[in-house]
Image: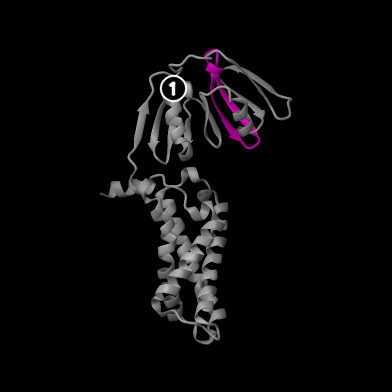
């Protein structure tokens, strides 16, 4: 039971919408929490000072939302939370907890401005404010997590491919000429020598297999430009924002509906296939394997 639970926390999970789209996610949260409080008026929420009830609620909701946006912006800058490809269920839950604690604390201190401050500076008031904010925020915050919960139980996928050269030999010896943006660098290779290309900032690393030896060539260019130069070679597919793969070199795939991991011939590297490219990959791999 423990091993199963531990495995679930390590499972890949879609990155939280709040951290992927902070502005849109924060606006959705603002609308949801405002409507929820206005309609149900949970925990006897009432107006403060000379403000009307609706304006009081709007102020608190704006504080909720501003805190979420600021925390999300900070967390997105951290390497641990920035990469959607390494996002797991445990990271998702940790992100939710951090956001909830952040808005709970900020709402308490906001009360000094919105409400009468004289009787607020004590632990009991802090605890009461913290619990209320936690209760009000937990549903809309975890809503983004629950939307993707189905991916947590996606069945694992694994498939071997018997040929690294593919069943369709059309253009197997086609010569490819690559030019850089500055047109100061050129690279030529045959299609069956190409394994994959990966983006590193402003540079592209070409992984080739020439004369029974692996070879890496680096040129200055963008992955999008290289993809355009590969348009006449349908078995060279961009499977990820940073990778283009020779489908005839794929030895196996593993993963689930969140994405695949590919093993390639003549290389020990593992290449990701993003969720958006799964359908296209499954269609093309059948043609060239």
The boundaries of the magenta stretch are 191-213
Q: Is residue 41 above or below residue 204?
A: below
How many numbered callouts? Answer: 1
Percent of width and height locating residue 154:
34, 42
Can residue 178 be seen?
yes
Q: Is residue 210 above or below residue 226?
A: above
10 Å neighbourhood of mark 1: few (<14), some, or many (≥20)? some
**Residue at left offset 49%, top offset 53%:** 17
Q: Is residue 280 above or below residue 98?
A: above
Q: Which residue does the numbered mark 1 point to in the structure image?
A: 287
Percent of width and height locating residue 109:
53, 75
User: Which residue is the extreme one toward the left?
Assistant: 1
Colouring chosen for the image of the structure: one colour
Q: Is residue 135 left or right of residue 196?
A: left
Can residue 130 be seen?
no
Q: Nearer the viewer, residue 275 or 10?
A: 275
Q: Is residue 105 above or below residue 50?
A: above
Reply yes or no: does residue 207 show up in magenta: yes
Q: Nearer the viewer, residue 129 or 223?
A: 223
Q: Is residue 161 left or right of residue 269?
A: left
Q: Main secondary structure of the magenta part?
A: strand
Could you tell me which secondary element the residue under label 1 belongs to? helix
């Amino acid at each position: 039971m423990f091993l199963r639970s531990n495995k679930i926390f390590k499972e890949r999970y879609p990155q939280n919408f709040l951290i992927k789209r902070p502005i849109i996610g924060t606006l959705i949260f603002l609308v949801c929490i405002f409507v929820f409080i206005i309609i149900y008026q949970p925990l006897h929420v009432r107006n403060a000072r000379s403000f009307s009830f609706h304006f009081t609620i709007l102020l608190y909701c704006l504080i909720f939302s501003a805190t979420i946006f600021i925390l999300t912006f900070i967390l997105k800058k951290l390497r641990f939370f920035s990469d959607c490809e390494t996002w797991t269920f445990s990271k998702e839950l940790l992100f939710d907890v951090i956001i909830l604690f952040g808005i709970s604390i900020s709402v308490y201190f906001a009360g000094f401005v919105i409400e009468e401050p004289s009787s607020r500076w004590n632990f009991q008031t802090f605890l009461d404010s913290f619990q209320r904010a936690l209760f009000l925020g937990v549903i809309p915050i975890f809503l983004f997590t629950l939307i993707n919960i189905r991916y947590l139980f996606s069945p694992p996928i694994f498939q071997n491919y018997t040929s690294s050269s593919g069943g369709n030999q059309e253009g197997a010896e086609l010569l490819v000429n690559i030019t850089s943006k500055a047109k100061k660098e050129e690279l030529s290779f045959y299609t069956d020598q190409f394994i994959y290309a990966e983006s590193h900032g402003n540079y592209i690393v070409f992984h080739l297999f020439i004369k029974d030896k692996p070879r890496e060539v680096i040129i200055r260019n963008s992955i999008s430009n290289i993809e355009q130069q590969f348009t006449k070679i349908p078995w060279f597919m961009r499977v990820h924002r940073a990778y283009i793969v020779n489908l005839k070199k794929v030895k196996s795939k593993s993963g689930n509906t969140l994405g695949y991991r590919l093993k390639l011939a003549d290389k020990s590297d593992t290449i990701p296939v993003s969720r958006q490219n799964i359908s296209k990959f499954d269609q093309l791999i059948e043609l060239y394997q």
